[in-house]
Image: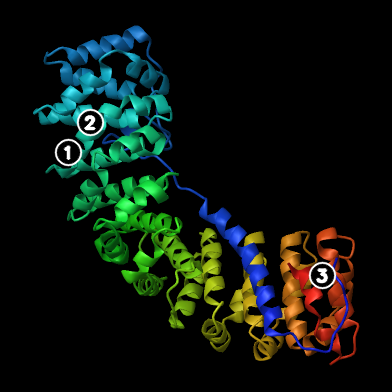
Amino acid sequence: MWSRQRRGAGLGGRGVEELRARRREREAALRKARRQEQLVSKRLLREDTTAEEGGQDGAEIVPDPLSEDEVLELLRGVQRGSEDRKRSLSCLRWALRNKETQQKFVRLEGSIRTLIGLFTSSLADMQMEAARCLHELSHSSDPAVAEACLPVTSYLLTYLSGHSVEFTELCLYTLGNLVVESEAVRKQLLPQGVIPVLASCIQSPHEAVLEGLGYVLSQLLQAKEAPTEIIPLVLDSVLPQHMLRLVCSGLKAGIGAAVEFAWSLHYIICSHTANTALLSLGALPALTSLLLDLASEIPEDAPEGLELLICPVLRCLSNLLAEETGCEVQIQDERLLIALFLILQCFLQQHPFIIQECLWLLNNLTDEHFFCSALLSLDLLPALLQLLPCSQMASVLVLTILCNIAEKGPAYCQQLHQQPALPLLLPTLALPDPKVVGQCLELLHLLFLHWPEAAADFVRQGGHQALEQHQSIPELQERAQALLDIIGQPLGASAFSPCHAMLSAFS
């Protein structure tokens, strides 16, 4: 239970550190949930368009399923060495867009072996058509179809060093699709040397090849076994430095590849196994410089899809700063704050998911005095406060950032008090979300501790009634009562210096 005993001693360093530690525990839980969001997906490369096939409004046309006899007849047509073989292959590729037909095809004896024979033939047109058939199969959501394609993986790797950009790209996306669906495929690819092959491909001058390679890597790095079986192999290769190079040259070399490699870096960082290695490559200053460059493109010359690159770059920076790597890492560049607020201003309406990413980074930055001071001196607090009503997560993060500032001491709390923070906190206290209200109560706790004048103003603005409404909510009632006790004391009384037992209410 929370004792509301009062002492004359001020809030010591141990108390502040305990408050911070407890808030960091809550942040860690939120961050863990966010890190577990995955972008596992499959890609289809098709040279024909929906319009050409009679589709309307971008809707994909899926053929009706074939009977087993019809599938068998198509396979026999492909196996016959007649002039109609290519036409049969094209018909098969079209038919394989249907899931049921895919399943029937792979169950036929010799079906995959036939495709592999054509895939490895010396006839370029047959080879490409067979590759497209395999690509359709790789897009299946049925793990049995992916595992039926196991015999093709070694050939896919071999052809990644081919001379045709279109063919190499097709092989990469087929490989990436198979990696998504099947652990058996991933386990087979590792001893076959997938990482060294990808390390060789990453020096390709072709943007399409690089984007496909980034797709394969991003899917591999999301596998549950990645931290122990895949990432160590990646770190032992030349991939990390080239990934970082390609991400940071994204606006010049091609934004598609940069997006894929940025997500790949994000998954490596989230594995907790490689951040020291990435920091030694200069990842932090490089990504910081990139974010400044990306912000400078806003709003005049921003290329289409810029937000798709900004999102993983923000995550990489945020998670690198959140890690305890054992080495001192400091970024002290107030331009980073300006960049974040420019990005927020640009994407607030069209791409609101960017708000949460910016706020996570801002939260980690304001753990340091430098960025707390910079945020206040650059007069960015009003813009931050405007984000309070954007969403539940935005509210929690904005309030956490304000707590980061408030815990730095009286001078910071005085500046928060001088800004229009308190009037905005009152409607926040009226929200039905206990997480948001709880974070708001913690902010008030810090403000009242370090700057008692804020408590007097809070009461004058109707704060007493706002706190009373939470006395009946179990997870909030103790903290609300503590603040009611504080504002009920004369200004300067020892109520503003609660004992160690009081701190437990704000856990």
Residue beneath label 2, please? 131
Find residue 238 and report its image quarter.
bottom left
Q: Report how far apart the C-alphas of labels 1 and 2 lie in the structure.
A: 11 Å
Question: Mark 3 touching mark 2, by CB under 8 A?
Answer: no
Residue 483 location (% of width, % of height): 84, 76
Give the Cα distance between marks 3 and 1: 64 Å
Mark 2: which amino acid?
A: Ala
Instruction: Name the kind of residue labelled 3 in the image.
Output: Arg
User: Position of 238 compared to 432: left or right?
Assistant: left
Nearer to us in this view, 423 or 502? 502
Q: How many marks?
A: 3
Mark 3 or 2: the one toward you: 3
Q: Amino acid at mark 1?
A: Tyr
Residue 444 in percent (x, y) is at: 76, 77
Q: Is residue 243 left or right of residue 317?
A: left
Q: Nearer the viewer, residue 105 or 201?
A: 201
Q: Is residue 468 left or right of residue 50?
A: right
Indicate the secondary structure of the residue bearing disc 2. Answer: helix
Q: Which residue is mark 1?
A: 159
Q: Earlier in the sequence, mark 3 or mark 2?
A: 2
Asked where in the image residue 503 lies, by quadrant, the reply is bottom right
Q: Which mark is residue 479?
A: 3
Residue 391 seen in render: no
Q: Is residue 384 above or below residue 494?
A: above
Disc 3 + disc 1, Cβ < 8 Å = no
Residue 42 visible in the shown view: yes
> Which callout, 1 or 2, points at the residue further toward the start of the chain?
2
What residue is at 33 percent from the left and 7 percent from the top? 69
For this view, does 322 lie left or right of residue 171? right
Residue nearest the viewer, comparing 8 with 458? 8
